[in-house]
Image (cartoon, grey):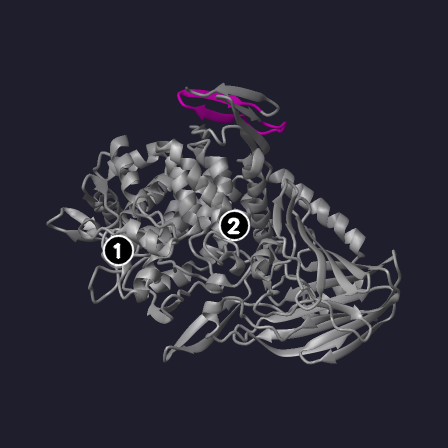
Amino acid sequence: MAVTAVTTTLTAETWEYEGYEPAQERLREALCTLGNGCFATRGALPECDADDVHYPGTYVAGCYNRLTSEVAGRQVENEDMVNLPNWLPLRFRLVDGAWLTPDTATVLDHQQILHVDRGLLERRTRFGLGEGRALTVRQQRIVHMADPHLAALRTEFTAEGFTADLEVEAAIDGGVTNAGVPRYRDLDGHHLTHVHTGSAEPGTVWLRCRTRTSDIRIGMATRLTGGGPVTTRHEHPRAVQTVRLRVEPGSTVTVDKTAVVHTSRDPAISDPRCAATERAETAPGFDDLLRSHRAAWDQLWRVTEIDVPGEPGRILRLHLFHVLQTLSPHTADLDVGVPARGLHGEAYRGHVFWDELFVLPYLNLHLPEVSRALLHYRHRRLTQACSAARAAGRRGAMYPWQSGSDGREETQRLHLNPHSGRWLPDHSHLQRHVGSAVVYNVWRYCEASGDADFLHTQGAEMLLQVARFWADSATWDEGLGRHRIRGVMGPDEYHDAYPDADRPGLDDNAYTNVTAAWVLARALELLRTLPEPRRRELVERTGLDDAELEQWEEISRTLYVPFHDGVISQFDGYGDLEELDWAGYRRRYDDIRRLDRILEAEGDTVNRYKASKQADVLMLGYLFSPCELISLFGRLGHHLDEALWQRTVDHYLDRTSHGSTLSGLVHGWVLARCRRSEAWTFVQEALRGDVADLQGGTTGEGIHLGAMAGTLDLVQRGLPGLETREGALRLDPAPLPELSSYGFSLRYQGHWGVRLRLEHGRTEIAVPHSDRSPIDVRVADRAVQVRPGQTCHVELPG
């Protein structure tokens, strides 16, 4: 029997749940995940097994495995981020009694508190045992931010009104599968094999296994300490430890469980099982671990400081917490990308999409070494991207829409529509614009960090190969007098083909073509500014010649951008599509975020309508400042003025269902510049996307990392109009009435802890003492230099 009164409270330091509600457990588990950039564990209750309510999961960054399943009569191969053996299990009962869980026992009180400020998950449950007796269980859990392979769980038991022996059983469980997403349950999720367990020093057990096809070896060890002797038994595929404790009224007894996780992908180890066992045996006690863990979090908070008042500030701090748990300083030592759903669950199979486009701009100005590592992930897979381009009959590099271990295309070829129960073709691999996102991240990282070495080496190699791909993908249309890019998909994702077409793909997606033109222009600019010896190396290695560069120049100015009814068309032919009865569908279905699934279940297709899942054309206003966008369209021969852009915004705003958590973010960002009175509605949706699970159950399968990082970047770059172009910090603030006073710190070209504060019509910039050069700051038509140790105040234009 469970407590029925459930409340959620968010403070600056904590995220709290009061009461137990099984239907909310998956959401809580995702939002209470603890991680350190190397691995993460969902916030599941340790005494509960995986079932329809609970889903404990532990994920190591970059640990993938590939399996083949039969789906709808076809053999389908998928690569998944692997759910590792579960180190968490710890259950308890009165001797000879039933195991106590919130699902099977009387719960008098239940509270779960995520201490965001120190990376600690606390749980308090008071079980009613009848006849005035109660047992209070308090647990504290950490995934250590200083030691990237270590986690710990402290459990305290307090008896009320009775004296008895309490049995506590802890385990490592190697019998786990990937089963956290209902849509994937027809797929093979048995990724682990060769599971063995054993004992080491008294109180320590270990488990070793490996992934079935990628052959990653996994070693896990736990140490159990408590108020009595620990006994051990091995029940394949689990290592089980038991301790018996005497509980008396008013006194508290404690059991500590320390866990270590290693894989064969880790540097500086020989065998993962030996490394895990040795570390578990010698790890400090819980109190010492908590102190060093908290010190590491304190340092991270200083580096990433953000000061936003009220509820938005509290949600932003939670978002930052989850970003840092997925991408921490430890990530700089790993070969990993940006998993779209963090290390928090199995949605999207842990794949890497374009979400880094929304994540790296924030990291660039706080943890540039992490941004560089994430870009190295892309560079290491450049050869694979070039092979993919050749297989498609193209030159250059064609990065996959979904990436995993080795950089091949991981996008599924079939996806399940839960509304109709049908498996449908998935054509989202046609989103070739991911290559432009890679280049965009390279360019913005180098602007913010001043890392000319990366730009001139790995960055240049990626930039030139993506530019070559776009140039080779463009075909000349004599009738239009323009170059065209055919057979692609844009960010919208609803539209993958023309109505009644016999093949997928769309022509001249505006976002794709404009960003391709930008890539080509940046490649030419880079070649002009490279040191001559390096330019010669690149030309020799890639076979570039003057004729090819002249072609790039021409294509960058002649790519076709379609228009209809005085607005930018999402793609060629978009203006000929039918209008949807938006009011009618909202009346019938209320929530139409996933309009594509609704229409398919009705036997219709969204391809027939002017309807978008998320921002597509308007993404251009997210990536580029107004002056950059005007210049970019001017290069393409179009006059983009405020009226044209406003009409375009209005057109798509009325025809977007916001079926992605990124949609509210982009619309809020764009509207802050052109329809400020409406921007806050979308900003709030972006802030609440995961904490309120606005997508209807998806957060429980893993948080949306791009949307979380994007809200941070909205405050950091979007509203202040912050750019790091041409060696200067540029500010063009667009304060919202609801968010007009806030501050943050950043790292800019070797300056640590630069503080910016926007308040009451002026900006304050403080640069800490150092031996660095002054920072050039541009605000509207003013230019100032701020020297180290100086604070400058700049009045904002009215």
Q: Which residues are magenta?
A: 767-787
- Would residue 615 be counted in the magenta stretch? no
For the residues labelled 2 and 1, the Cα–Cα distance comes to 45 Å
Q: Amino acid at mark 2?
A: Ala
Q: Is residue 152 left or right of residue 631?
A: right
Q: Is residue 61 left or right of residue 224?
A: left
Residue 390 shows in this picture: yes
Question: Which one is in front, 598 or 89?
Answer: 598
User: Residue 220: percent from the left, percent from the top?
Assistant: 69, 68
Q: At x 73% / y 68%, what residue is drawn?
A: 100
Question: Which one is in front, 362 or 115?
Answer: 115
Q: Secondary structure at mark 2?
A: loop
Q: Secondary structure at mark 1?
A: helix
Disc 1: which residue: 472
Label 1 neighbourhood size at 10 Å, few (<14), some (14-19), many (20+)? some
Disc 2: which residue: 692
Q: Amino acid at mark 1?
A: Asp
Can you tell which quarter of the image residue 149 is in? bottom right
Q: Is residue 428 above or below residue 738?
A: below
State which tag comes first along the sequence, 2 or 1: 1
Can you tell which quarter of the image residue 403 is in? bottom left
Residue 201 shows in this picture: no
Q: Is residue 460 left or right of residue 632?
A: right
Q: At x 44% / y 63%, what residue is drawn?
A: 407
User: Residue 663: percent from the left, percent from the top?
Assistant: 40, 47
Which residue extends farthest left? 479
